[in-house]
Image (cartoon, rainbow, N blue to C red):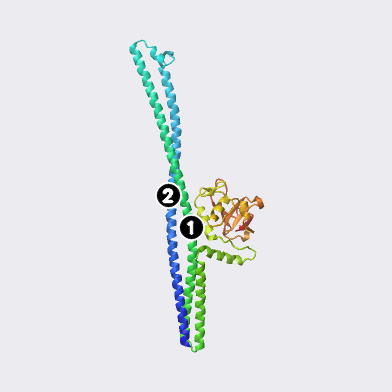
Amino acid sequence: MKKLGLKKVAVMAAAAFTVLGVATSASADTQSDLDAVKAKIAETEKKVSEGQVALSKLESQEAKTSQEIATLKKNIAARSAQLADQARAAQLNDAGSMLEFVANSDSVTEAVSRTVTVATVVRANNQTLADQKADKEKLAQKQTDLQTAAEKQKEQNKELAQARADLAVQKTDLEAKKASEDEAKAKAEAAKKAAEEAAKQVAAAKSTDDAEKAANQAEAAAASVSSSSNNSNSNNQTASQTTTNQASSQAASTSAAPAASSVNSSSVLAMADSLTKMHIPYVWGGSSLSGFDCSGLTQYVYGHFGKSLARTAAAQAAQTTRIPVSQAQPGDLLFWGEGGGVYHVAIYVGGGSYIHAPTEGQFVKYGSISGWAPSFAGRL
């Protein structure tokens, strides 16, 4: 019987070793993926920074060109005045025109001299006008080229910002997956240790009953960790499912609150946080990285995770289950106003803070409930 107990413990220990090996391998693979995403984030952030510098230079050159155009306009006015002065100077002895100026010559020699003078003035006038036209065309083309380059750089910056936001979401999902796998690994290590300890107890048992009892304890411990590991692997199919299960468990403990959102709140918050670092301005009716209003921001963020929100704060409020602000969980929406008069919406991040697109002249940023308290919260 004692040998049977040892055999049972050996089988359970082998199972624990197998689970531990799988958990360790999965954790290593996820860590590798996580490291790769972090490297991409660092590379993308560098490109974002370089793109912002390039755009600033282009905008500075645009401003300089505008100043040059303004200076040219002044020069053109001065040249026009100079031409007028030259024309007046050519009209000697109150002559009515340059032709009269030539016709009033006292001799053929003087007439030739005056003709040369008039021709010189005409050539100078024509050259001045040609120079003016060339300068205008040159600066106009330069300004057009700068504007085209600036628009292209803005588009590239927008694409980089989107890539950084997407990578932030991937990073959050992988971190959640890694944490779950690390937990499974810890449980497998504990089961392995328990099986080894049980093996010692079986070997030292003085009766077959004691040996069988120790073996059964080891079997129960190994079965428990195997079950936990299987559940963990199932949950790890996607980081979103893991987060959802955790949120559902938390919601179940609070009977007064509705079920937690099916949206991955960790991913939502990761993307929203990344947007606060991009200096995205408030734009009335805006719903893209070039500018957001409050509901455009929430619609954009949740839309990336398969949740379609209406376009206005009031309509979004109607899509949610209303709950007190005190029961809000990270990922819920916060609203200001009542009924059809809801006029502002934000994403709650926990700890009394939220992310929103405030108003004209400001960027997407964090806010505090203590600084501006919402009227109610809404759960999707």
- Mark 1 lies on a secondary structure that is helix
- Mark 2 lies on a secondary structure that is helix
Is 196 on the left or on the right of 327, as rendered?
A: left
Label 1 or label 2, whichever comes before in sequence order: 2
**Identity of the residue drawn at 51% across and 88% down:** 209
Q: CA distance from mark 1 to mark 2?
A: 19 Å
Which of 101 and 302 lies nearest the eye of the viewer? 302
Other residues around mark 2 within 10 Å, as few (<14) / some (14–19) / many (≥20): few
| Residue 72 visible in rendering | yes
Nearer to us of marks 1 and 2 is 1
Pick out the residue farthest to the right. Answer: 339
**Identity of the residue drawn at 43% across and 56% down:** 42
Pick out the residue farthest to the top. Answer: 106
- Looking at the rendered structure, which numbered label has been put on residue 154? none
**Residue denoted by label 1:** 168
Position of 336 relative to 231 (above/below) = above
Position of 252 relative to 309 (above/below) = below
